[in-house]
Amino acid sequence: MRWGLVGASTIAEQHMIGAIRASGGDIAAVVSTTPARARDFADRHAIPVAEDRLERVLQDRSIAAIYISSTNEKHREQALAAIAAGKHVLCEKPLAMTVAEAAGMVRAAEGLVFATNHHLRCSGSHRTIRDLICGGRIGRVLSLRLFHAVHLPPHLQGWRINDPAAGGGVIPDITVHDADVARFLLGEDPLSVVAQMGASGMGQGVEDSAMSVWSLPSGVMVQSHESFTHPFAGSGLEVHGTEGSIFARGVMTQLPVGEIELVTAAGRALVPFPPHNLYLQGVTDFLAAVAGTGQPAATGWDGVASLAVALAVREAARSGIRQQVDYGRAA
Ligand code: NDP
């Protein structure tokens, strides 16, 4: 598969170029809004074509797939252009700035593969936790707690902490991932949310911390905490059920690390999980979808749903009023 990259980004550099190449993919071009950055990025990563005009790359009929990792406000327009050119699209989260825009992207991609790069559901740890839940190992699920307060490293403290127009803020950055984790593990969509958010030292015009509680159709309660300003908090999740609890530490990360502990009446036990690369798994699932033999790890609609939950959290925090989650499916 020949790919075009849209966005000379950190995530492409640190994870996705390696994942695409490890899957057997060929990276034919990179598009950046700045010609010099495109050239520099292409040279550093041995990518033959550096472009500042997306349409030039989209005209290349040998390129079958586009990976979009620009700043958030650009995803929609770039994805729609790629879709119009008949390309399969793997798009970074959040898919767009609004649920309606994201839903429009997914609808436009009918007949093509359109996937969201939610990496956590590609991890061996999260897939193992889901298997434990689905296998009844903790009985009926009562609650899920998500701990995702991290310290945003200096090299990422740009638009994320000071540019609302680019889609900055911890809610579009991390709460979307947590929404996807909850949906993936529990197999249901939050109905409504209550929330608080604030700036705790990093955010300038955007929130850098959020806490929220989500109500699910089954009655399961989800508690979620995201931040850019917590250097020593560590990440993780807990799932509590009538017959047991799962404690997963260090698993809200880009790497196949952490540990899972299952606690039941029989005692405590560490549960092993496959140590595969999360991003390679996502690309592998994307390729299976293109080949017609599988589904993307996270579909476009999964990306719409995670954005819907995140934006409901932001609105609940802004207004102080419980928000119903609007998934935009009827529009
Ligand atoms: P970066 O800030 O590294 O890159 C985003 C854009 O900023 C690039 O596309 C580039 O624009 C521009 N840019 C990059 N470096 C510079 C620079 N030195 N000077 C000026 N502009 C620059 O963002 P990330 O890689 O952290 O995030 C990109 C996207 O990926 C976001 O949508 C984010 O939400 C998502 N993401 C997803 C992750 C996941 O695990 N699924 C993890 C991290 C991010 P241009 O397009 O012009 O090249």
Image (cartoon, rainbow, N blue to C red):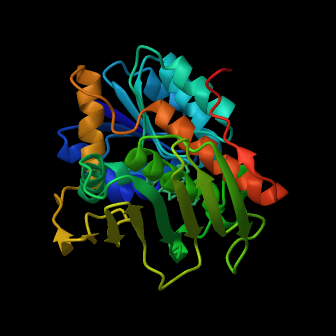
Q: Is residue 225 above or below residue 319?
A: below
The residue drawn where x is 15% and y is 65% is 272
Q: Is residue 58 left or right of residue 207?
A: left
Q: Residue furthest top?
A: 111
Residue 59 percent location from the top left of the image: 44, 20
The quarter of the picture where residue 14 lies is bottom left
Q: How many marks?
A: 0
Residue 49 percent location from the top left of the image: 37, 38
Residue 44 visible from this viewpoint: no
Q: Is residue 150 above or below residue 173?
A: below
Residue 87 percent location from the top left of the image: 41, 22
Q: Is residue 130 left or right of residue 201?
A: left
The quarter of the picture where residue 196 lies is bottom right
The residue drawn where x is 23% and y is 37% is 25
Q: Residue furthest right?
A: 319
Q: Is residue 124 left or right of residue 119?
A: left
Residue 245 visible from this viewpoint: yes
Q: Nearer the viewer, residue 283 or 138?
A: 138
The residue drawn where x is 56% and y is 36% is 304
Residue 202 percent location from the top left of the image: 67, 76
The residue drawn where x is 45% and y is 24% is 58
Q: Quadrant of the C terminus?
A: top right
